[in-house]
Image: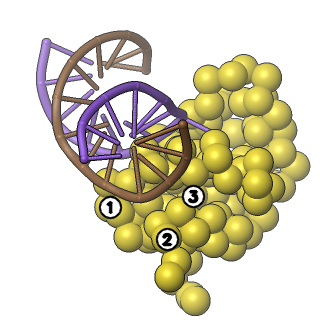
Chain colours: A yellow, B purple, C brown
Amino acid sequence: MESFTERVIHIIQRIPSGKVMTYGQIGQLAGSPRGARQVVRILHSSSKKHGLPWHRVINAKGEIGIKAEGAAEHQKAMLESEGIMFTGRNTIDLEAYRHHPEIF
DNA sequence: TTCATGACGGGGA
DNA sequence: ATCCCCGCCATGA
C-alpha cells in the first residue's frame, strides 16, 4: 500500500521541467488537503534518499520558501535554466508555471 | 504509546 | 506590502 509519503514522492517525480507545484497542491493531490507541512518533511527525508527534483516545489505565493540563501539561489538558478522567469528576487508567476497533473 | 518536527497556508494586524 | 499567529497532520524516535 502506498503511504502518503510515497504518493508525494511519486507526484514530485512527475513534475515536468519548466513547471512547478506548491506544497499545498501536492499534499492535496496526495490525499491530505492540509498536508503541506508533511510535504515539507518528506522533502527533507526523501530528497536525500530519492534524489527528488525538490527545486520544482515552491510555496503557495509563487516564491522560494527555503530559508538557506545559498540553496534558495541554487534553486532559482535551476528554475531559470528550465525556462522559468522570475518576477522578483525569488518570485515567479505561479499561475503561468503551475503544473496541473490531471492526466494520469 | 506520546512528543517534537517541519523548505507551509491563510487570515488578521 | 510585511509580520505574526494558529491550524494541519504524517512521520520517526
Q: Can see residue A29?
A: yes
Of badges 3 and 1, the one in the foreground is: 1
Tag 3, which chain?
A
List x then y, in percent, for residue A87.
64, 36
Which residue reaches farthest right?
A: A81
Which residue reaches farthest bottom?
A: A104
Contact, CB < 8 Å: mark 3 with mark 1?
A: no
Q: Which amino acid does label 1 sit on?
A: Pro
Q: What element carries label 2?
A: loop
Q: What element carries label 1?
A: loop
Circles 3 and 2 on the same subunit: yes
Gap between marks 3 and 2, in whole Å?
A: 20 Å
Q: Is mark 3 on a helix, strand or loop?
A: strand
List x then y, in percent, for residue A77.
83, 38
The one of A81 and A21 positioned closer to us in this rendering: A21
Q: Which mark is residue A81?
A: none
The one of A91 and A39 positioned closer to us in this rendering: A39
Classify 10 Å Cα crowding around label 2: few (below 14), some (14-19), many (20 and above): few
Q: Residue A3 carries which label?
A: 2
List x then y, in percent, for residue B11.
16, 36
Q: Name the residue under label 3.
A: A21
Q: Name the residue under label 1.
A: A33
